[in-house]
Image (cartoon, rainbow, N blue to C red):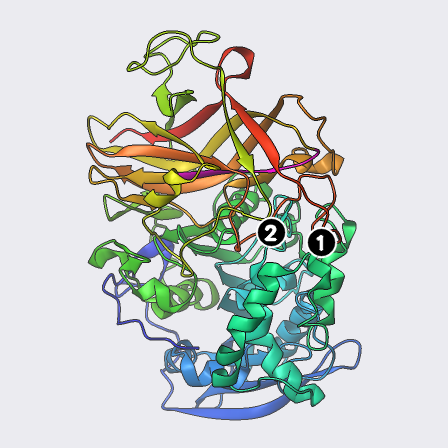
Amino acid sequence: MSHPFPRAAFAFLGLLAVACVACTPAPTPMPTGLRHDVDVAIPMRDGVVLRAEVLRPIPDRRYPTLVYRTPYGAHAAVADYTTFSRAVERGYAVVVQDVRGRYRSDGEFRPYEHDGRDGHDTIEWAAAQPWSDGNVGTFGLSYPGAVQWLAAMERPPHLKAMVPAMTFSTPQNFFYTWGVWDMSWVSWIWFNIAPDARARKNLPGPRTDDEVQAGWPAVERRMRDTLPLDAFDALNDVAPYYADWLHHPPEDPFWGFAELRGKYSRTDAAVLNLSGWHDDNYGPEGATTNFRGLVQARDGQPANTALLIGPWVHGVGATGRTKAGDREFGPDAAIDYDEVVLGWMDRHLRGMGADRPADPPVRYFVMGANRWKTAGAWPPPARSVTYGLTAAGGLVELGTVPVKAGQSLSRNVTGTVPDFSQFVSDPDNPVLNPYDSAGAHDYRALADRGDVLTFDSAPFESDTEVTGPIVARLFVSCDCRDTDIWARLYDVAPDGTAFNLMSPGLDVLRASYRDMEKGRQLLTPGQVYELTLDHLVTSNVFKRGHRVRLQVSASFFPNFSRNLHTGDLETTSSRRQRATIRVYHAGAHASRLVLPVVDR
């Protein structure tokens, strides 16, 4: 763990009603020192004892209190992150707790399953301490972000403010992603969870960072090669819950412990949702969904609710950098994460700045333009621009050329052409992600694969901003019982560079889960189905001369699992086959890409 970002290239003090230099001074004097207690026992309702480090100011008095819960080691967090010491300097007591079954806390670790109740109990314990004034806030990113939401769903009465960063809204876009298993759980457990689990259980295997890193290539090869997925046994001793997860399909009520949607009325805490356009797939979807859910639950009013999305990849350190992957976004892209968190707490726990008008609740970074914009709601006002897919590999704005059955929509092609494009998907030769790091990368080489369909627009005649949800409505058939459809979006420069606009996962749908509420519905071979991929989201200016590229495939490996095309689930079967997949272009089956274009 690290916290290497520089101090605020973009100070961000005025963000979203966050406290700034013009705000009302703190009502109590600033602390003159810090008291640091370790192994502080916190009993849960079922008798299990969790342990924490507690940092609080000197002199002794009652302070607003922050709670941070982590599976990655409370001691490491305090050592590596500056937020805690800066919070104490600011006049907060801070509780940094190992979650159940991790490091110094007792109990069994089952990710996320106990964190709602345990989070509630920890918040209420903190509020009752003699050094707390009873006003509690929570913060953290990724797992420490998710546990805030899970605790909030339990309605702890003393929870007043939250900054959940880079986390999910639903298990259907976290464990699975719209029906497809997320393969990154293996690396997450191997690198982050297994070493401590081996130490706690006295199990053989890697425990140090160097040992874990050295052992990964062999484990990764086994992960890639193993079908069914539940035959992969490298984690059985350290993470028995992983095999359990694989036996619960995405629609299973089992996953209810991690579902936030529809529950936002359970909290009235002030919530700042934070993510990045190149965060893991669940991040930007989670932030925007959770923000909109809160606004709706609060009668359409965004009071005490905010949304902040930058261009970043996953992680605290990423928020202080100006580059995501191979794409540079300029000095304004970086923020001071600590200041954002503590500013939000200053306003909502201490009342600082409450006498000044609130800033717009939405602030987002526009990639390509490389600047921040604000809005009163998400998504911001935009007009829908619809593109048709052509058999010649084009994306043509509808209205420019009429849609006619059996005719190409491309102005550069005349005569009758097929009304579909097709490719063959082979589970034994899936589309491979050539990059093992997150962020924007040049994916132009994927256009050379025979199992990837590429559709390019004409060059833009002027700079064009696309901000908000994007919809790919594809009409598809397959000579199989099931398939996955990926609809990846790129910004293609005149020199051919094709930068992805989001992380993989926002842009996929398993065909058998085309209507999740109805559960799994296998395909009839040869029948045409309408598949709507409506979780893509970004904010990007396509510069003059750039193009939009849409690529359609049936796999993106090893980020996500492979569809076997037989109707069997890859979690429990290895029976697989090649499949021919068609994407239709014309008439009643004309596939579409709908972009939200913001007038500039």
Figure disc tally: 2
- Vertical relation: 533 (above or below) 72: above
- Vertical relation: 41 (above or below) 262: below
Q: Are marks 2 and 1 in contact (CB under 8 Å)?
A: yes
- Three-letter residue code for mark 1: Thr
Q: Is residue 280 left or right of residue 15?
A: right
Secondary element under disc 2, as helix, strand or loop, is loop
Q: Position of residue 570 (x, y in %)?
A: 69, 50
Q: What residue appears at the point 65 percent right and 70 percent down from the top-left corner?
A: 119
Q: Is residue 384 left or right of residue 563?
A: left
**What's the magenta region?**
481-489
The image quadrant that residue 318 belongs to is bottom left
Q: Is residue 457 left or right of residue 586?
A: left
Q: Is residue 181 visible?
A: yes
- Vertical relation: 66 (above or below) 420: below
- Three-letter residue code for mark 2: Ser
* Predominant SS along the magenta part: strand
Q: Position of residue 38 (x, y in %)?
A: 56, 92
Identify the mark at residue 63; answer none if there is no mark.
none
Q: Can you identify the residue that label 1 sits on?
A: 571
Q: What residue appears at the point 61 percent right and 67 percent down from the top-left corner?
A: 158
Q: Can you identify the residue that label 2 sits on?
A: 561
Residue 108 among magenta residues: no
Secondary element under disc 1, as helix, strand or loop, is loop
The image quadrant that residue 102 belongs to is bottom right
Q: Is residue 376 visible?
A: no
Q: Residues within 10 Å of mark 2 (few under 14, many from 20)?
A: many
